Amino acid sequence: MRLSEFDYHLPEELIAQEPLADRGGSRMMLVDRALGKISDHAFADLPEFLAPGDVLVLNNTKVFPARLLGQSETGAKIEIFLVREISGTVWEALARPARRLPVGKRVTFSNGFSGTVVEKESDGKLLVEFSVDGDFESALEKAGRTPLPPYIRRNPDSLDRDRERYQTVFAKQRGSIAAPTAGLHFTDGLIAQLEASGVEIIEITLHVGYGTFEPVRVDDISQHRVSKEDYEISEKAADSLNAARRESRRIIAVGTTTTRALESNITNGLEFVSCRAASDLTITPGYEFKAINGLLTNFHLPKSSLLILVSTFAGRQIIMEAYQHAVASAYRFYSYGDCMLIV
Protein backbone atom coordinates (compact mmCIF):
# COMPACT_ATOMS: atom_id res chain seq x y z
CA MET A 1 0.00 0.00 0.00
CA ARG A 2 1.06 3.58 -0.57
CA LEU A 3 1.79 6.10 2.14
CA SER A 4 -0.70 8.52 0.58
CA GLU A 5 -3.52 6.17 1.55
CA PHE A 6 -2.91 7.08 5.20
CA ASP A 7 -3.21 10.82 4.80
CA TYR A 8 -5.97 13.09 6.12
CA HIS A 9 -6.56 16.81 6.60
CA LEU A 10 -6.30 18.07 10.17
CA PRO A 11 -7.07 21.71 11.05
CA GLU A 12 -4.26 23.03 13.19
CA GLU A 13 -6.65 24.21 15.89
CA LEU A 14 -7.55 20.58 16.69
CA ILE A 15 -3.99 19.77 17.79
CA ALA A 16 -4.13 19.83 21.60
CA GLN A 17 -1.51 22.24 22.93
CA GLU A 18 -2.38 21.83 26.61
CA PRO A 19 -3.51 18.86 28.69
CA LEU A 20 -6.98 18.89 30.19
CA ALA A 21 -7.11 19.86 33.85
CA ASP A 22 -8.79 16.53 34.53
CA ARG A 23 -6.78 13.59 33.18
CA GLY A 24 -9.88 11.49 32.77
CA GLY A 25 -11.98 14.22 31.20
CA SER A 26 -11.20 13.42 27.57
CA ARG A 27 -13.56 12.13 24.92
CA MET A 28 -13.39 8.57 23.62
CA MET A 29 -14.50 7.29 20.23
CA LEU A 30 -15.58 3.65 20.09
CA VAL A 31 -14.76 1.72 16.91
CA ASP A 32 -16.53 -1.63 16.76
CA ARG A 33 -14.80 -3.73 14.09
CA ALA A 34 -17.42 -6.47 14.00
CA LEU A 35 -20.32 -4.07 13.49
CA GLY A 36 -18.38 -1.54 11.44
CA LYS A 37 -19.77 1.13 13.77
CA ILE A 38 -18.34 4.36 15.17
CA SER A 39 -19.82 6.07 18.24
CA ASP A 40 -18.92 8.92 20.60
CA HIS A 41 -18.40 8.58 24.35
CA ALA A 42 -16.44 9.96 27.29
CA PHE A 43 -13.26 8.26 28.49
CA ALA A 44 -14.98 7.90 31.86
CA ASP A 45 -17.32 5.44 30.11
CA LEU A 46 -14.46 2.98 29.52
CA PRO A 47 -15.61 0.51 32.24
CA GLU A 48 -18.90 0.07 30.35
CA PHE A 49 -17.04 -1.44 27.39
CA LEU A 50 -14.84 -3.82 29.36
CA ALA A 51 -16.09 -7.08 30.86
CA PRO A 52 -15.01 -9.00 33.96
CA GLY A 53 -12.01 -11.09 32.99
CA ASP A 54 -10.79 -8.68 30.31
CA VAL A 55 -7.09 -7.92 30.57
CA LEU A 56 -5.96 -4.30 30.17
CA VAL A 57 -2.22 -4.01 29.48
CA LEU A 58 -0.42 -0.79 30.43
CA ASN A 59 3.04 0.44 29.49
CA ASN A 60 4.66 1.61 32.73
CA THR A 61 7.66 3.31 31.14
CA LYS A 62 8.67 6.67 32.58
CA VAL A 63 9.70 9.67 30.50
CA PHE A 64 13.02 11.25 31.41
CA PRO A 65 13.96 14.88 30.65
CA ALA A 66 15.72 14.14 27.36
CA ARG A 67 15.75 17.70 26.01
CA LEU A 68 18.78 19.82 26.84
CA LEU A 69 19.18 23.53 26.06
CA GLY A 70 22.71 24.86 26.09
CA GLN A 71 25.32 27.12 24.51
CA SER A 72 28.36 26.41 22.40
CA GLU A 73 31.73 28.02 23.12
CA THR A 74 30.79 30.80 20.68
CA GLY A 75 27.54 31.54 22.53
CA ALA A 76 25.19 29.97 19.98
CA LYS A 77 22.03 28.43 21.44
CA ILE A 78 21.99 24.67 20.92
CA GLU A 79 19.30 22.08 21.61
CA ILE A 80 20.34 18.47 22.21
CA PHE A 81 17.67 15.76 22.20
CA LEU A 82 18.83 12.47 23.73
CA VAL A 83 17.73 9.46 21.70
CA ARG A 84 19.53 6.39 23.05
CA GLU A 85 22.14 5.61 25.69
CA ILE A 86 25.23 4.04 24.18
CA SER A 87 27.33 3.58 27.31
CA GLY A 88 27.37 5.51 30.56
CA THR A 89 27.67 9.16 29.58
CA VAL A 90 27.80 8.61 25.80
CA TRP A 91 24.45 9.12 24.05
CA GLU A 92 23.09 9.09 20.54
CA ALA A 93 21.32 12.39 20.05
CA LEU A 94 19.65 14.79 17.67
CA ALA A 95 20.72 18.43 17.64
CA ARG A 96 19.40 21.76 16.46
CA PRO A 97 21.07 23.40 14.64
CA ALA A 98 23.21 20.34 13.82
CA ARG A 99 25.33 22.31 11.34
CA ARG A 100 26.86 24.23 14.24
CA LEU A 101 28.12 21.04 15.85
CA PRO A 102 31.20 19.52 14.18
CA VAL A 103 33.09 16.72 15.92
CA GLY A 104 34.89 18.17 18.94
CA LYS A 105 32.33 20.93 19.55
CA ARG A 106 31.44 21.41 23.22
CA VAL A 107 28.05 22.53 24.52
CA THR A 108 27.49 23.71 28.10
CA PHE A 109 24.12 23.16 29.78
CA SER A 110 24.84 24.31 33.33
CA ASN A 111 27.76 24.73 35.68
CA GLY A 112 29.69 21.48 35.67
CA PHE A 113 27.51 19.84 33.00
CA SER A 114 28.53 19.82 29.34
CA GLY A 115 28.68 17.58 26.29
CA THR A 116 31.15 17.14 23.44
CA VAL A 117 30.33 15.82 19.97
CA VAL A 118 32.50 12.73 19.40
CA GLU A 119 30.94 11.44 16.16
CA LYS A 120 28.46 12.47 13.46
CA GLU A 121 26.42 9.62 12.00
CA SER A 122 25.23 9.32 8.40
CA ASP A 123 21.54 9.64 9.36
CA GLY A 124 22.07 13.03 10.98
CA LYS A 125 22.35 11.85 14.57
CA LEU A 126 25.33 12.65 16.77
CA LEU A 127 27.23 10.81 19.46
CA VAL A 128 27.70 13.10 22.45
CA GLU A 129 29.93 12.38 25.42
CA PHE A 130 28.83 14.19 28.58
CA SER A 131 31.01 15.56 31.33
CA VAL A 132 29.44 16.20 34.72
CA ASP A 133 30.46 17.10 38.25
CA GLY A 134 28.73 14.33 40.17
CA ASP A 135 25.95 11.99 39.03
CA PHE A 136 24.83 12.17 35.36
CA GLU A 137 21.19 11.31 36.04
CA SER A 138 20.93 13.95 38.77
CA ALA A 139 22.44 16.57 36.45
CA LEU A 140 20.01 15.55 33.70
CA GLU A 141 17.02 15.83 36.05
CA LYS A 142 18.04 19.39 36.90
CA ALA A 143 19.08 20.64 33.47
CA GLY A 144 16.85 18.57 31.17
CA ARG A 145 13.38 19.48 29.91
CA THR A 146 10.35 17.35 29.15
CA PRO A 147 10.71 16.11 25.53
CA LEU A 148 7.39 17.35 24.18
CA PRO A 149 6.58 16.57 20.52
CA PRO A 150 7.29 19.37 18.02
CA TYR A 151 3.59 19.97 17.31
CA ILE A 152 3.21 21.22 20.89
CA ARG A 153 4.56 24.71 20.46
CA ARG A 154 5.96 26.12 23.69
CA ASN A 155 8.57 28.74 24.50
CA PRO A 156 11.72 26.61 25.06
CA ASP A 157 12.82 29.00 27.80
CA SER A 158 9.57 28.70 29.78
CA LEU A 159 9.18 26.73 32.99
CA ASP A 160 9.12 22.96 32.47
CA ARG A 161 5.51 22.63 33.58
CA ASP A 162 4.87 19.33 31.78
CA ARG A 163 7.29 17.33 33.93
CA GLU A 164 4.46 15.61 35.82
CA ARG A 165 1.55 15.87 33.37
CA TYR A 166 3.40 14.33 30.42
CA GLN A 167 3.69 11.16 32.49
CA THR A 168 1.19 8.40 33.22
CA VAL A 169 0.05 7.86 36.82
CA PHE A 170 1.50 4.34 36.61
CA ALA A 171 4.93 5.36 35.23
CA LYS A 172 7.70 3.45 37.02
CA GLN A 173 10.54 2.37 34.73
CA ARG A 174 12.64 5.33 33.55
CA GLY A 175 13.76 5.26 29.94
CA SER A 176 11.35 6.88 27.43
CA ILE A 177 11.87 9.98 25.34
CA ALA A 178 8.10 10.25 24.75
CA ALA A 179 5.07 9.32 26.80
CA PRO A 180 2.87 6.32 25.96
CA THR A 181 0.11 8.85 25.43
CA ALA A 182 -2.91 6.52 25.47
CA GLY A 183 -2.09 5.99 29.14
CA LEU A 184 -2.24 9.70 29.99
CA HIS A 185 -6.05 9.54 30.35
CA PHE A 186 -6.00 7.13 33.29
CA THR A 187 -6.41 8.19 36.89
CA ASP A 188 -5.79 6.09 39.99
CA GLY A 189 -9.52 6.21 40.62
CA LEU A 190 -10.46 4.81 37.23
CA ILE A 191 -7.88 2.02 37.52
CA ALA A 192 -9.34 1.09 40.91
CA GLN A 193 -12.84 1.14 39.40
CA LEU A 194 -11.78 -1.19 36.60
CA GLU A 195 -10.13 -3.62 39.00
CA ALA A 196 -13.20 -3.62 41.24
CA SER A 197 -15.32 -4.53 38.21
CA GLY A 198 -13.19 -7.60 37.49
CA VAL A 199 -10.87 -6.20 34.81
CA GLU A 200 -7.32 -7.48 35.23
CA ILE A 201 -4.60 -4.82 34.99
CA ILE A 202 -1.17 -5.93 33.77
CA GLU A 203 1.91 -3.75 33.41
CA ILE A 204 4.74 -4.26 30.95
CA THR A 205 7.49 -1.87 29.83
CA LEU A 206 8.47 -0.56 26.43
CA HIS A 207 10.80 2.44 26.39
CA VAL A 208 9.51 4.74 23.70
CA GLY A 209 12.34 5.73 21.39
CA TYR A 210 12.94 7.70 18.22
CA GLY A 211 11.40 4.97 16.10
CA THR A 212 7.91 5.69 17.45
CA PHE A 213 7.80 9.16 15.88
CA GLU A 214 10.34 8.83 13.07
CA PRO A 215 8.71 9.92 9.78
CA VAL A 216 7.87 7.31 7.15
CA ARG A 217 10.16 8.30 4.27
CA VAL A 218 9.11 5.72 1.67
CA ASP A 219 5.97 5.67 -0.46
CA ASP A 220 5.72 1.87 -0.39
CA ILE A 221 5.00 1.39 3.31
CA SER A 222 6.08 -2.25 3.23
CA GLN A 223 9.63 -0.88 2.90
CA HIS A 224 9.45 1.17 6.12
CA ARG A 225 11.22 -0.14 9.21
CA VAL A 226 10.58 1.18 12.73
CA SER A 227 13.75 1.48 14.80
CA LYS A 228 14.30 -0.92 17.68
CA GLU A 229 12.86 -0.16 21.12
CA ASP A 230 13.68 -1.99 24.36
CA TYR A 231 10.89 -3.77 26.21
CA GLU A 232 10.46 -6.02 29.23
CA ILE A 233 7.73 -8.47 30.23
CA SER A 234 7.98 -9.95 33.72
CA GLU A 235 7.32 -13.58 34.54
CA LYS A 236 4.18 -12.58 36.43
CA ALA A 237 2.88 -10.58 33.46
CA ALA A 238 3.65 -13.38 30.99
CA ASP A 239 1.88 -15.94 33.19
CA SER A 240 -1.20 -13.71 33.47
CA LEU A 241 -1.29 -13.05 29.72
CA ASN A 242 -0.96 -16.77 28.93
CA ALA A 243 -3.76 -17.59 31.36
CA ALA A 244 -6.00 -15.05 29.61
CA ARG A 245 -5.28 -16.65 26.23
CA ARG A 246 -6.01 -20.15 27.52
CA GLU A 247 -9.31 -18.93 28.93
CA SER A 248 -10.24 -16.97 25.79
CA ARG A 249 -10.33 -13.67 27.68
CA ARG A 250 -9.76 -10.44 25.77
CA ILE A 251 -6.36 -8.76 25.91
CA ILE A 252 -6.67 -5.01 25.32
CA ALA A 253 -3.51 -2.98 24.80
CA VAL A 254 -3.33 0.58 26.05
CA GLY A 255 -1.34 2.25 23.30
CA THR A 256 0.59 1.34 20.19
CA THR A 257 3.79 0.92 22.22
CA THR A 258 2.14 -1.74 24.37
CA THR A 259 0.85 -3.36 21.18
CA ARG A 260 4.32 -3.46 19.66
CA ALA A 261 5.80 -5.07 22.76
CA LEU A 262 3.08 -7.72 23.04
CA GLU A 263 3.09 -8.58 19.35
CA SER A 264 6.90 -8.76 19.37
CA ASN A 265 6.91 -11.05 22.36
CA ILE A 266 4.34 -13.72 21.61
CA THR A 267 6.21 -16.79 20.34
CA ASN A 268 4.80 -18.64 17.34
CA GLY A 269 1.55 -16.77 17.97
CA LEU A 270 0.93 -19.04 20.95
CA GLU A 271 2.64 -17.98 24.15
CA PHE A 272 4.06 -14.93 25.91
CA VAL A 273 7.50 -15.27 27.47
CA SER A 274 9.23 -13.37 30.24
CA CYS A 275 12.19 -11.46 28.84
CA ARG A 276 14.08 -8.26 28.24
CA ALA A 277 14.50 -7.72 24.52
CA ALA A 278 14.46 -5.20 21.69
CA SER A 279 11.42 -4.99 19.45
CA ASP A 280 12.23 -4.60 15.77
CA LEU A 281 8.66 -5.27 14.65
CA THR A 282 7.10 -3.02 12.02
CA ILE A 283 3.33 -3.50 11.63
CA THR A 284 1.90 -2.76 8.19
CA PRO A 285 -1.14 -4.08 6.27
CA GLY A 286 -0.97 -7.83 5.89
CA TYR A 287 0.34 -8.36 9.41
CA GLU A 288 -1.78 -10.82 11.43
CA PHE A 289 -2.24 -9.79 15.06
CA LYS A 290 -1.61 -12.64 17.49
CA ALA A 291 -1.48 -11.03 20.93
CA ILE A 292 -4.25 -8.44 21.29
CA ASN A 293 -8.03 -8.34 20.89
CA GLY A 294 -8.56 -4.63 21.46
CA LEU A 295 -6.66 -1.36 21.47
CA LEU A 296 -7.02 1.99 23.24
CA THR A 297 -5.08 4.64 21.37
CA ASN A 298 -4.85 8.38 20.77
CA PHE A 299 -5.25 10.00 17.36
CA HIS A 300 -2.04 9.95 15.34
CA LEU A 301 -0.28 12.06 12.72
CA PRO A 302 -1.12 11.65 9.03
CA LYS A 303 1.20 9.23 7.18
CA SER A 304 2.73 8.00 10.44
CA SER A 305 3.77 4.45 11.35
CA LEU A 306 1.35 4.64 14.30
CA LEU A 307 -1.64 5.45 12.08
CA ILE A 308 -0.58 2.58 9.82
CA LEU A 309 -0.42 0.21 12.81
CA VAL A 310 -3.89 1.21 14.01
CA SER A 311 -5.28 0.91 10.47
CA THR A 312 -3.76 -2.55 10.15
CA PHE A 313 -5.48 -3.65 13.36
CA ALA A 314 -8.94 -2.20 12.67
CA GLY A 315 -8.97 -1.89 8.89
CA ARG A 316 -7.91 1.15 6.89
CA GLN A 317 -11.38 2.10 5.69
CA ILE A 318 -13.05 2.30 9.09
CA ILE A 319 -10.07 4.08 10.65
CA MET A 320 -10.01 6.75 7.95
CA GLU A 321 -13.77 7.16 8.40
CA ALA A 322 -13.19 7.45 12.16
CA TYR A 323 -10.57 10.15 11.62
CA GLN A 324 -12.89 12.10 9.33
CA HIS A 325 -15.58 11.84 11.99
CA ALA A 326 -13.10 12.97 14.66
CA VAL A 327 -12.20 16.06 12.64
CA ALA A 328 -15.86 16.90 11.93
CA SER A 329 -16.69 16.42 15.63
CA ALA A 330 -13.74 18.54 16.83
CA TYR A 331 -11.96 15.82 18.77
CA ARG A 332 -8.63 16.89 20.26
CA PHE A 333 -5.66 15.28 18.48
CA TYR A 334 -2.25 13.86 19.33
CA SER A 335 -0.42 13.52 22.65
CA TYR A 336 -2.68 15.64 24.86
CA GLY A 337 -5.76 14.86 22.81
CA ASP A 338 -8.70 12.47 23.01
CA CYS A 339 -8.66 8.72 22.44
CA MET A 340 -10.21 5.84 20.51
CA LEU A 341 -11.16 2.38 21.80
CA ILE A 342 -11.07 -0.30 19.09
CA VAL A 343 -12.80 -3.59 19.93
Image (spheres, rainbow, N blue to C red):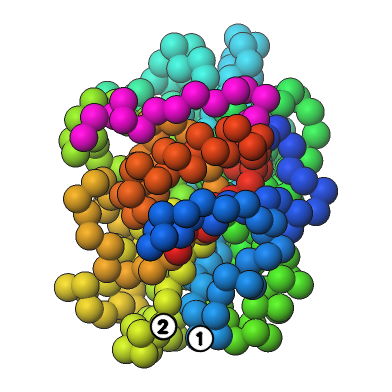
Q: Nearer the viewer, residue 97 or 23?
A: 23
Q: Give the answer, above or below, for where 23 lies relative to 74.
A: below
Left or right of 186? Residue 230 is: left
Residue lying at 62% horizontally and 11% vertically, measured from the top left: 76
Q: Give the answer, above or below, for where 298 lies relative to 144.
A: below
Q: Nearer the viewer, residue 338 or 90?
A: 338
Q: Which residue is label 1 attached to?
A: 53
Q: Which residue is label 2 attached to?
A: 249
Q: Quadrant of residue 241?
A: bottom left
Residue lying at 60% horizontally and 87% vertically, measured from the top left: 198
Left or right of 170? Residue 301 is: left
Label for residue 301? none
Q: Position of residue 176 (x, y in %)?
A: 52, 51
> In what quadrant of the picture does the N terminus appear?
top left
Q: Are marks 1 and 2 in contact (CB under 8 Å)?
A: yes
Q: Position of residue 202 (x, y in %)?
A: 51, 77
Residue lying at 41% horizontally and 83% vertically, measured from the top left: 249
- Asked whether residue 127 is in view, the answer is no
Q: Which residues are magenta?
A: 1-15
Nearer-N-terminus badge (1/2)? 1
